[in-house]
Image: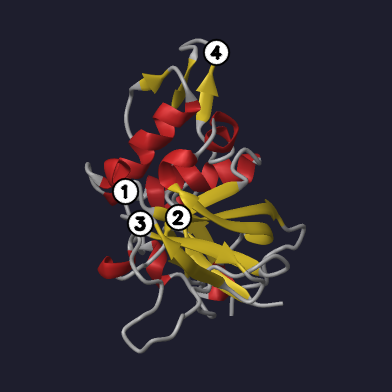
Amino acid sequence: MKERPILFSAPMVRALLAGTKTQTRRAVALPRSRDSFVLEDRGAGWWPYQSDDGESPLCDDGMEHPYTCPYGRPGDRLWVRETFARIDGQTHPWIETDYRATYTHGDRLGDSLGIKKRWSPAIHMPRHASRILLDIKAVRVERLQDISEADAAAEGLLYNTDHMGHWSGTGERWYSTAREAFRDLWQSINGPDSWGANPWVWVVEFERAQTQKGPAS
């Protein structure tokens, strides 16, 4: 079993904690010249085996090269990186960690004293500070726009009965379908033209591991 880090925004962290997010999609890093290749799962990796436009499936060196999912395979684990603040004690460094996704102003004495909390970007979170561990259950490759309504909902998009719609976590707009909300979320992260590009994406399905995070060290 391998463990790898993965970044999530605050709304997605809250969805992970609530158990409503069980999938994530990340773009496959394909060279420009091979964007049209279809990927086939052969166990040890995903291999380009034909082209939508009839081009040769071979690289310049005359060989096929597998694409391995950088997030792991079933049985591996992901530890979540999120925006955080380190709490030091009077005699020991880093005794606790605060998490921006769920932090409420006033939880610390420093808030009432007017001490500004120093939040650190998720990319800088070390393993010992992570509080969420995910067990990978399945990995596959598909085109972004092939996402179903059920899979879009599994991306952790909030449904509100008052608004009768889904929220992407990026603004105040509510969408009639989870798929529309996911499109908004994807474009907010990857750019306004990213949905229309319809890239290949890694689809990683997971469930939250029943393992507590280790103490800070």
**Residue 102 visible in rendering:** no
Mark 3 to mark 2 CA distance (whole Å): 36 Å
Give the number of the mark in front: 3 or 2.
2
* Mark sitting earlier along the chain (4/1): 4
Kindly identify the residue that appears in the image at 59 percent across and 80 percent down. Answer: 217
Q: Which residue is disc 3 drawn over?
A: 117
Q: Which residue is disc 1 drawn over?
A: 189
Question: By what rule are the colours in the image chosen?
Answer: secondary structure
Specify the amino acid type for callout 3: Lys
In terms of image quadrants, where is residue 76? Answer: bottom right
Mark 3 to mark 1 CA distance (whole Å): 26 Å
* Mark sitting earlier along the chain (3/1): 3
Category of crowding for the residue at label 4, using alpha-carbon neighbours closer than 10 angstroms: few (below 14), some (14–19), many (at least 20): few
**Residue 170 visible in rendering:** yes
Mark 1 to mark 2 CA distance (whole Å): 14 Å
- Dot label at residue 69: none
- Along the horizontal axis of the image, is 123 left or right of 66? left
Q: Which residue is disc 2 drawn over?
A: 201
Category of crowding for the residue at label 2, using alpha-carbon neighbours closer than 10 angstroms: few (below 14), some (14–19), many (at least 20): many
Do the residues bearing badges 4 and 1 touch, measured as CB atoms within 8 Å?
no
